[in-house]
Amino acid sequence: MNEPTERPIEWHSVIDSTMRRAAELAREGAPPGAIVGADHQSAGQGRLGRPWHSASAGGLYFTMVLRPKLAPADLPIITMALGLAVADTVQMFTGLPCDLRWPNDVLANGRKLAGILTQMQDGAVLAGVGLNVNQADFPPELREIATSIILETGTEHDKHFLLRALAGNIESHVHILETGGVNAILRLFTAASSYVAGRRVSVELPAGDVKGTTAGLTPEGFLRLRTDDGEEITITAGGVRPID
């Protein structure tokens, strides 16, 4: 079902994955800015092939088709631009301060408020966003690590209004990347994130967890980590968690 709007928005009450459907639309030539959204996802996708909990109609789940004038190597930077857009939109329209955890998590009071997934598809970038808006509760395994706008502010928000605000802000931040270059987004992300430098973290890697202190971003947008052994390594992918 399509909502009446200038921006092409295909909205579903239930879908397996907005990312999958947006990929179909991208292959068919969907214009930049086209959106697939849903109240529920039965097979929502997270990073590294992990499922994204999206059973509650209180959440905002959507994938936006982007066609930026950027190289495929800039995909990690696009993910950061999306994180900045989500954090800015939430702070602007709800008053809730947000933190950014490299590479793709938006946090509120240390708990996950939103996640971002980007994929390339036939020359387009699929920008997937899952934002917890009006969920009053989470499954037991997520209660300590996830939160929502209503839990943090006590106020219910119109997720369709937030969707349109997010879409515009995503396009604005991608434009910053196109015109200001990678360094513009790296500077903004570094300023908005408590995780980029000087943060004690544990990073989940295929060979095992590594502990250390974050030491900034590389020019490609990867995370530098100074390990407890004194070695500096570059994290290109992996779950980053704080060490208290």
Image (cartoon, grey):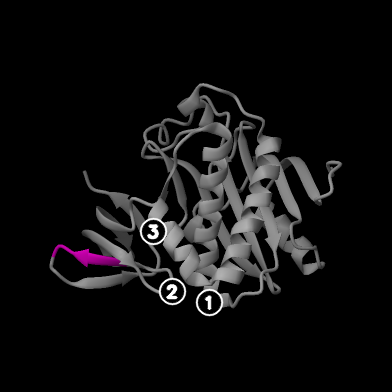
Residue 34 place in picture, x, y as percent: 76, 56
Residue 18 in the image: above or below residue 148: below
Mark nearest the camera among 3 and 1 is: 3
Indicate the quadrant where residue 5 lies.
Answer: top right
Does label 2 or label 1 sit earlier along the sequence? 1
Q: Residue furthest left?
A: 229
Q: For the residue marked with disc 3, what is the amino acid?
A: Thr
Indicate the quadrant where residue 191 lies.
Answer: bottom left
The residue depicted at 57 percent of the width and 43 percent of the height is 89
Mark nearest the camera among 3 and 2 is: 3
Does the residue at mark 2 contact the one at mark 1 (Cβ under 8 Å)? yes
State whether residue 17 appears in this view: no
Residue 19 place in picture, x, y as percent: 66, 56
* Real-space Cα separation, disc 3 to disc 1, in angstroms: 20 Å
Q: For the residue marked with disc 2, what is the amino acid?
A: Glu
Question: Relative to the observer, which residue lies in front, 20 or 86?
Answer: 86
* Real-space Cα separation, disc 2 to disc 1, in angstroms: 8 Å
Q: How many marks?
A: 3
Q: For the residue marked with disc 1, what is the amino acid?
A: Ala
The residue depicted at 53 percent of the width and 26 percent of the height is 150
Query: Where residue 73 is drawn, which disc sits there?
Result: 1
Q: Please identify the quadrant where the N terminus is shown.
A: top right
Residue 126 part of the magenta segment: no
Q: Please identify the quadrant where the C terminus is shown.
A: top left
Residue 244 placement, left or right of 173: left
* Span shown in magenta: 224-228
What residue is pinned by disc 2? 220
Residue 124 placement, left or right of 132: right
